[in-house]
Image (cartoon, rainbow, N blue to C red):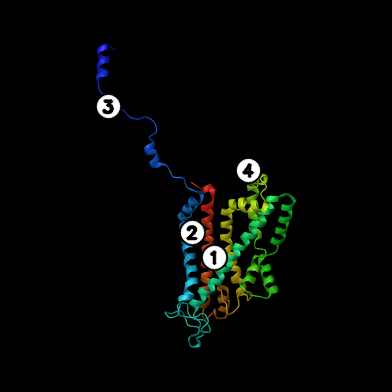
Amino acid sequence: MNENAVNSIQEEALDPKDFQIQGADTASAELFARKPVTYWRDAWRRFFENKLAVVALCLLIVITLCTIFVPIFSSHSISAHDLLNRKQWPSAQHWFGTDDLGRDLFVRVWTGGRVSIVIGVLGAAIVAVVGCIYGGIAAYFGGKVDMLMMRIVEILSSVPNLLVVIMMSVVLESSSIPTLLFAMTVTGWCPIARLVRSQMLQISRSEYVMAARLMGVSPLKIVVRHMIPNTFSVIIVAVTFRIPGFIFGEAFLSYVGLGVQPPNTSWGALSSAAQSSLLYYPYMMFFPALLIALTMLSFTLMGDGLRDALDPKLRR
């Protein structure tokens, strides 16, 4: 290259627009970068992507709200007798009809739903607490303690739960809600204890649990503060699946006469009272039986949705 050409190039004005930046474009990359999403927020998003689980959740909300507010705002009383309107089919005045004493079934069905749902939720909560503590202690100590505690669980699990519930109801000679809860939870915590133990056996060998032990933290505090929270997602799913079992158990006991007794009522008690009139007045059993089925199905579908949403393997 001669001297004249070099001088001409140096004399030319350099325009920045003639140059293109090579490498990563950070400004554009930030537009497409995904914001960090927490585990629970991602699980919540995946749960709402499951349309069937969302429908089940909405149905449960509607049923729960009806059990709370319908008896409060209804013009009919749960115990008011009207013998002139006994065994009336569903109509504009009595949406679910009337029973053999002329009582409005619409109010009685939603009032009975309070007892059934409360027993289902409280029963599942009790077995979850007992099962978590029992399974957590067995997993934490291990060895002979774990072996002894699991043998006790196996002995209790070998007896049919429904048989235990019937025996306890007969022995206690009471049909109150606390008695029913005690009878249904006396062995109902065993499956939860097995599940929690298997999960916590893996967690007990983790570094943060070993560090807590070296710092002198008490075993109960380690189980409650460190081990149980890390199995919380599994516990939520297990509890959701247990609620339908308690609702069905209460309905069965009330149906055979060992559950809720008058003047209280429940879906099982209403179905039992309608048994004698089933052939000629099937609506008396249809509505409480329908709500039992819908509630149990909704909890089961919601449990399926929670199981899929809380599974870390499916996280994207």
Residue 286 is at least partly visible in this image:
no
Name the residue nearer the viewer: 125 or 222: 222
> Is 20 rendered above or below residue 280?
above
Report which residue position mark 3 lands on.
Answer: 15
Q: In the image, 164: left or right of 308?
A: right
The span from disc 3 to disc 4 (Cα, nearest Å) is 59 Å
Q: Which mark is residue 53?
A: 2
Q: Are marks 3 and 1 in contact (CB under 8 Å)?
A: no
Report which residue position mark 4 lands on.
Answer: 207
Query: Mark 3 or 4 closer to N-term?
Result: 3
Q: Which mark is residue 296?
A: 1
Q: Residues within 10 Å of mark 3 (few under 14, many from 20)?
A: few
**Residue 30 percent coordinates (x, y):** 39, 40
Name the residue nearer the viewer: 254 or 17: 17
Where disc 4 sits, the SS reads: helix
The span from disc 4 to disc 2 (Cα, nearest Å) is 36 Å
